[in-house]
Image (spheres, grey):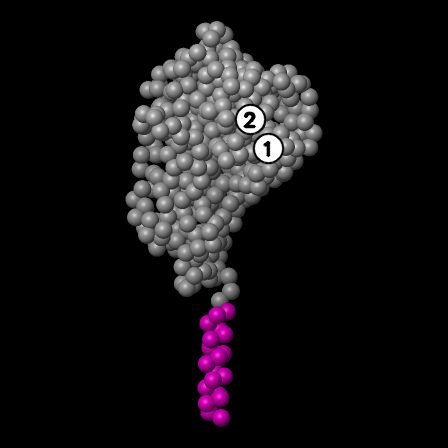
Amino acid sequence: MKQNYLLIMLCSLLLLANCKGDDSVTPEENPIKVVSTGKVEGKVFAKNGTKPIGGAIVFTTDSQSNIYHTYSNADGSFSLTAPEGKTTLHIQTGDGKNFRTELPVTIKKNETVTVAATDSKLDQIAKMAYIKGSYDEIEAIITSLGYTATEITYQDLKNINTISQYDIIFLNCGSRTYAQTGTSMPSNDANVYSNLSTFVSNGGSLYSSDWASAYLVGGNTNTENCNAPGGFINDNLLCLKDIGTATNYIGCSVSNPALATALGFNTLDIQYDMGAWEKIQNYDPAFWDVLVQKGNEPLMIRTGHYTNPSAPQTPVGTSLNNNHITICHHTASGNNITITINQNAWNAHQAHGDTMGPCTGNSSSGNIYYTTFHNHASGNIGKAGPILEYVILNL
């Protein structure tokens, strides 16, 4: 009888020990350890303080460099469960190299801490530039978000020392016209294409829209045919023709799940208010990710796979990233995430099995985004506006 009584008491104690409620969590990298936690919540905003940012990764680490992360909703809101104690909250978009914010927080056991909106605004780390276009003004969207970009010229693209100081370059539709370039044959300017190739190969990112496809695959003011002369992306990877007509594309789909979640919608109508816009004829799906499409027709694509082994190694980007590195954080669940961290924390992350460089794409190259649409002169671009905002913050 006494043995039975002791057994019952032992079982009761075990049950109590395992009923900890919301104040405990099991780190994904260390499934044996259980730690006391609290919550931190808030909203991620652009620098203007009014535009909510969806799809931003919000994370913190404990003393053993275990990562606890979540993503902001389409309305910018987030709620993160993390270990109690003083820590640093990281907010990043893209891989965190170009836009990120860090702020100290104290997580309290079983309590929720709210981050002030003034502290959760996404900072611009990148140095950005744009080339003025004739029909497109991505710089207007950049400014509306509270960020800054420097105007450069087509001629500046001929000097790698000039463009290498930037992290991101925006190539507006219509920026290759004679009025912008000062030359009638930009397709023959191999120096520009070589410099853009070097820029991306060394970590710089590009955004190109509509007629600015000629920077990528060749052409004069735009790309009239496949295999056009010039460009730095091989013709077998992408083919475009300027055969689009003025029309409305009804029921386009946001085919990338992460983009759809960040935006809060997965369908939209796109107004093409000018003719001769660039239609994607074919592309290499191993090289490009399709983000927006109409049926089987890609309308917005992205790659992080560009590489040019013969490109010279040239430092690219702002000095603010000199003490930060981009890594792929490996979780036990296989849900790997790309983040940018202080390089002093690398040894601890490496001990977890994390690897240098992003989780996808080429480890040393930047991203290239291409959209067949852009912000129109009337400014009435509907749901395409949030998509272009996403592009800016995720380059």
Q: Is residue 15 magenta?
A: yes
Q: Are marks 1 and 2 in contact (CB under 8 Å)?
A: yes
Bounds of the magenta span? 1-19
Q: How many marks?
A: 2
Outermost residue on the bottom side: it is: 1
Q: Earlier in the sequence, mark 1 or mark 2?
A: 1
Residue 345 drawn above or below residue 245: below
Residue 218 drawn above or below residue 89: above
**Viewer-side residue, 70 vs 179:** 179
Q: Is residue 317 shown left or right of residue 48?
A: left
Q: Is residue 345 shown left or right of residue 11?
A: left
Mark 2 Cα shell of 10 Å, populated few (<14), some (14-19), many (≥20): many
**Viewer-side residue, 168 vs 99:** 168
Q: Secondary structure at mark 2?
A: strand
Q: Residue at x 44, y 11 (%)?
A: 188
Determine which quarter of the picture holds residue 126: top left
Percent coordinates x, y for residue 177 in the rendering: 51, 10
Q: Pointer 2: what residue?
A: 371
Percent coordinates x, y for residue 40 in the rendering: 48, 50
Would residue 229 be visible to someone looking at this image? Answer: yes
Label for residue 292? 1
